[in-house]
Amino acid sequence: MNTRHVTSLVAAGAAIVMLLSGCGSTGTSNSSNASDSNIISVYGSEPAHPLFPGNTTEAGGGKVVDQLFAGLVTYDAKGGIHNEVADSITSSDNATHYVIKLKSGWKFTDGTPVTAHSFVNAWNYTANSANKQASASFFSTIEGYDDLQKPDVDPKATLSGLTVVDDNTIDVKLSQPDSAFPVKAGSHAYMPLPESAFKDPKKFGQHPVSNGPYKFVSWQHNHSIEMVKNPGYKGNRVAKNDGLNFKIYTSPDSAYADLRGGNLDFTNTIPDTALTSFQSDKSLKAYNEPGGNTLTFTIPEWLEHFGQNEEGNLRRQAISMSIDRKTVAEKIFHGTATPAVDFLAAPISAYSKELKGNEVLKYNPSKAKELWAKANAISPWSGEFGIAYNADGTAKNWVEAICNYIKNTLDIDAKSIPMSTSDEFLSNVDSGKMTSAYRSGWGPDYPSADNYLVQLYDSSSADGKGGNSGNYKNPEFDAMMDKALSAPSTEEADKYYQQGEEILLQDLPAIPLWNQNATAASTSAISGVAFDYGGGPVFTALTKKQ
């Protein structure tokens, strides 16, 4: 989804309480009228859904929602947590009970106050399966969540664990320990919503009212999303520019050409055709830093020959071992990606190169053929193997490369399947309509291994309730994630996360490929380029020389 990340902060409840009770500076925003002179034009793609934070799980919408909304906490460049709308978040009873105190004086851009009801109403709406919000699983540890997942649930039903004590106080009771709860509190799923969002959700999704560093102006579909600096914003991310214009492209090459021609100010999507030259192009400013994004591809278990069984596991392992990740990284990514060794990114504390079973991520053609033959002995292979991707992104070259490796190693018909736009591609992924394997990956929502593992592979995130789009379900893995969330320290939690990853290395619900660097380019007039803990650009920091 959208890009964020760094060290795992799943620690004891007491440590998190100390972190969140008194830290975090609160900036103030000087009221001013935005002028076109310091409006920054940036690369964008058409959001897959209306702009509801709880239904935003992909980069096109994520970049926009990040700028419009402010949650309980924010994250700094090193993954540290700072209070935003929250004044404090305190826990008790082994991280199963939280009390949240809000700062007063926050308002939405329509002038209505941000209160405890703004958060609780938004969380109830997102968690209720009748509303079909993609981030419902983020609330799976709150009491009453399971009741909201029943097929006949009342759309107005609420989480029994949430109580509004007063306008500035929220009481949260959990059904299990969740020491990551305060870390999640800055993710899209936990953003507040004004009353207008529930009165007319369709209208709100096209013209959101928010409380973040920017105020929404317009969304011309497939053309642009414009926003201006929010003079009423009271948080940590005060904009240094007057606004942003997300220019929507269907091709990164077109955006890069506009950048070089002076018709775009900034892009953090470098096309494959420019990876060898963008850092030496003297007409631009180039950036290439370590990041937190992972690149994978998913083979959903509903495909023939790929069930969650011995045959399916053998075939996934064979396909993984048929890919030369190092060569592809060198020849296609040109120093902007490194081969994956686990399911996390390097800055996460649970990241490890020593996991049992990680040999399935290493190029071994002879072993791949052996595993494929064992699978054929269970059920002979038939048909072709395809990997779908969105043609308006940067996946074409690497998808074609790994398909060639699979074809040549396993002697099967393997091919890439382009889909014209991100919108079309993600709609099929989200609705479970994919009839092939498909390009996947992750840019973290909050700085914790929980975000990479629970939100992508836990059973609670399957069936359209979260990022587990392949509907992978393994009770043994789920149990490890529960143990990690109950652990009294980061070190102990990381052991459980790693044991969970070792299960994933056997089942391979998604096949890890590479970890991506944070890459970007701007015109010479742009300054202030910086990246967050996950390698995503800090848009509020951008300024433009006149």
Image (cartoon, rainbow, N blue to C red):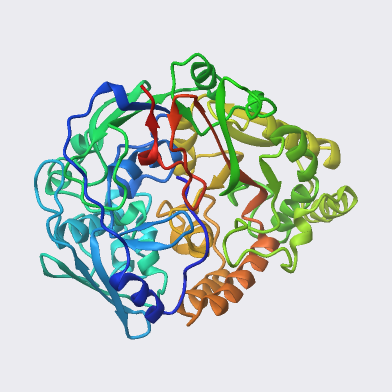
Q: Residue at x 73, y 40 (%)?
A: 329
Q: Decide: is 440 above or below 520.
A: below
**Farthest top residue in view:** 261
Can I make out residue 153 in this image? no
Tell me where residue 328 appears, x and y as whole percent.
Answer: 76, 38
Residue plotted at (17% across, 44% down): 197
Q: Can residue 374 be seen from the camera position used here?
A: yes
Name the residue: 49% across, 17% down.
258
Image vertical order of residue 488 relative to residue 258, above or below: below
Task: Using the image as rendered, state which of residue 313 and residue 151 is in the foreground.
Answer: 313
Q: Nearer the viewer, residue 427 or 51?
A: 51
Residue 364 higher or lower than 102, as above or below: above
Tell me where residue 243 sits by quadrant.
top left
- On the image, the x and y values in percent for residue 460 come to 44, 63
Residue 248 drawn at (x, y percent): 41, 24
Q: Nearer the viewer, residue 498 or 435?
A: 498
Check the picture and name the quadrant holding the C terminus.
top left
Q: Where, by quadrant of the figure, is residue 173 drawn?
A: bottom left
